[in-house]
């Protein structure tokens, strides 16, 4: 697995390759000859599928297959007998330098390598590709983005690009410019998403097919979700056009046009989270497993005068919308890490031998050499601790996003965004209002998801969530807290709250529309969970 991560070599399933070649042959049936580029040939599955396809193979003028592994290239050359095959042993980033060729079809599954695993020379070449395409964000987050950008340039004026890509293309902020580039370069775009993982050894990485056509009689963006891979070869799918491209992300393609219309209509009448409160990331310790300790460690190293209570992560507060003193004490009693070691320049360290011993343990563990700690004046002084906030929003979740009132008056790590209410608004009402199908649906649309179905929202994505604010009294909120704890799922909360909250935001909203909004959230949630 380590070698695969370094090379990004997650090879395409045969069923997928054969489907794609057969599907593309239909799109290119009017062409008498085609030139093809495979920028990351790997085990040659696409090349073999092309030559094995009777109708398509006869049209092939040239296939340029680029692969950096000599072993894989030799295997492919032995299995494929065709004079039109040009097998090139090279890194694509080297091959593309100064190369002005154009191809009728660019087809492949580019490598998936995160930037921290790329060599310096690779990063520089990727940056140059991004700069050439006039992208503002030139530093690659993953090598596949540079393959995509450069291969768009290799696609001729009437050509087609077909790539197997991570679903990050639809979701993440750094791919926003790529989405715009795709819409600019291709008259027709097709997106195939899948309910099952195509690459079992690339855990948690959801995948899609992107097909871009330079010229098309039927222009637009078309989507299709495939339940099982076998459905492709049996043609059990229908592409549907989605003309609503208002959002910078494309995750909304799982919805029908009328569903998007309804969401957009309601969103237009709502304020967002940032209208009701200010939020910021919690405390960055640089080493939570060292600076956040349990009660036994506090006692063992006499840290009582140097600690502050803190909530470390969202899993400690499952099932509630309030963190109370009693609930926090349960965490303490269960030996959870609940205390932040808060040393500052006024701390008398050398006079406390046990504390000094704990700092020595930190140095033995090389805590002081970690990036965040090494740039501090004193590695053991956690900066910007501040004071406890009114509430927390945990940026990652599984079943549903977690927004809590901080009744325990504790700090929070950067696993949460801390919340301070603006004048005229109350944390209780914001929490009550937050849990409705519209807000939670937009959380699914705005956020990104990965391994295990985890949903994550960045600070800006959280701030932009629309919320139909509803004033709730203290007694009603207390009842709500109890009901929330007793729920069997978030569906119960949405069903109860939707009629109260959504009706208050739009008196003209009928029962059918409220039911549709509930189903939209359900659809998006199950899409996230099923694909992981």
Image (cartoon, rainbow, N blue to C red):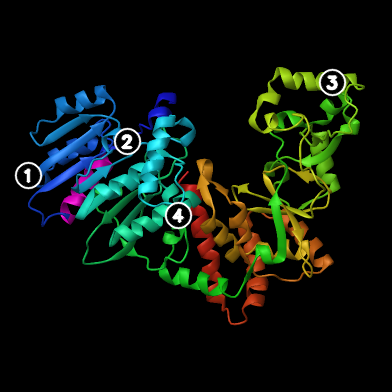
SS at circle 2: helix
Q: Residues within 10 Å of mark 2 (few under 14, many from 20)?
A: many
| Residue projecting furthest to the bottom | 508
SS at circle 3: helix
Mark in the foreground, 4 or 2: 2
Mark 3 = which residue?
Answer: 356
Asked if residue 238 shows in the view, the reply is no
Mark in the foreground, 2 or 1: 2
Which residue lies at the image location 42% right of the left edge and 48% below the top edge? Answer: 167
Q: Which mark is residue 34?
A: none
Mark 1 = which residue?
Answer: 58
Q: Relative to 121, does residue 273 appear above or below in the rendering?
A: below
Q: Position of residue 181 (x, y in %)?
A: 36, 56
Q: Please report contact status of discs 3 and 2: CB closer than 8 Å, yes or no.
A: no
SS at circle 1: loop
* Earlier residue among tags 1 and 4: 1
Using the numbered discs, state the Cα–Cα distance from disc 4 to disc 2 in whole angstroms. 22 Å
In the picture, the quarter occupied by the N terminus is top left
């Amino acid at each position: 697995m380590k070698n695969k991560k370094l090379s990004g070599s997650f090879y395409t399933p045969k069923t997928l390759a054969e489907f794609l070649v057969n599907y593309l042959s239909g799109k290119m049936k009017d062409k008498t000859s085609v030139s093809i580029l495979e920028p990351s040939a790997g085990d040659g599955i696409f090349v073999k599928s092309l030559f094995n396809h009777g109708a398509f193979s006869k049209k092939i003028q040239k296939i340029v297959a680029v692969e950096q592994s000599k072993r894989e290239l030799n295997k492919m050359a032995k299995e494929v007998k065709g004079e039109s095959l040009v097998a090139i042993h090279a890194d694509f980033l080297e091959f593309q330098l100064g190369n002005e060729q154009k191809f009728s079809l660019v087809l492949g599954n580019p490598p998936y390598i995160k930037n921290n695993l790329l060599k310096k020379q690779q990063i520089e070449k990727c940056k140059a590709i991004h700069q050439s395409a006039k992208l503002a964000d030139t530093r690659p987050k993953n090598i596949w983005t540079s393959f995509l950008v450069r291969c768009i340039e290799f696609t001729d004026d009437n050509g087609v690009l077909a790539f197997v890509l991570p679903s990050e293309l639809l979701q993440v902020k750094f791919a926003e410019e790529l989405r715009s580039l795709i819409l600019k370069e291709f008259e027709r775009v097709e997106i195939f998403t899948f309910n099952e993982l195509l690459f079992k050894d690339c855990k948690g990485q959801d995948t899609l097919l992107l097909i871009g056509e330079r010229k098309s009689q039927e222009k637009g963006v078309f989507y299709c979700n495939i339940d099982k891979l076998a459905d492709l070869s049996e043609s059990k799918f229908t592409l549907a056009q989605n003309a609503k491209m208002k959002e910078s992300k494309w995750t909304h393609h799982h919805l029908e046009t009328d569903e998007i219309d309804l969401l957009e209509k309601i969103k237009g009448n709502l304020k967002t989270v940032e209208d009701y409160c200010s939020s910021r990331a919690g405390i960055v310790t640089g080493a939570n497993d060292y600076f956040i300790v349990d009660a036994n460690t506090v006692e063992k190293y006499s840290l009582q005068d140097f600690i502050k209570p803190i909530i470390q992560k969202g899993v400690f507060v499952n099932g509630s919308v309030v963190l109370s003193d009693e609930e926090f004490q349960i965490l303490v009693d269960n030996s959870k890490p609940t205390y932040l070691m808060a040393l500052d320049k006024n701390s008398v360290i050398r006079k406390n031998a046990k504390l000094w011993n704990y700092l020595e343990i930190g140095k033995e563990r090389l805590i002081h050499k970690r990036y965040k700690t090494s740039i501090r004046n004193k590695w053991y002084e956690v900066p910007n601790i501040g004071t406890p906030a009114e509430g927390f929003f945990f940026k990652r979740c599984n079943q549903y996003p977690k927004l809590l009132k901080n009744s325990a008056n504790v700090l929070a790590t950067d696993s949460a965004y801390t919340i301070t209410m603006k004048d005229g608004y109350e944390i209780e009402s914001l929490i009550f209002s937050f849990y409705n199908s519209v807000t939670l649906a937009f959380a699914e649309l705005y956020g990104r998801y990965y391994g295990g179905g985890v949903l994550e929202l960045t600070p800006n994505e959280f701030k932009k969530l629309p919320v139909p604010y509803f004033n709730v009294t203290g007694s009603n909120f207390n009842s709500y807290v109890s009901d929330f704890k007793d729920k069997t799922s978030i569906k119960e909360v949405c069903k109860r709250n939707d009629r109260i909250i959504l009706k208050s935001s739009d008196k003209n909203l009928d029962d059918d529309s409220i039911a549709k909004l509930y189903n939209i959230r359900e659809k998006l949630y199950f899409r996230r969970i099923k694909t992981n």
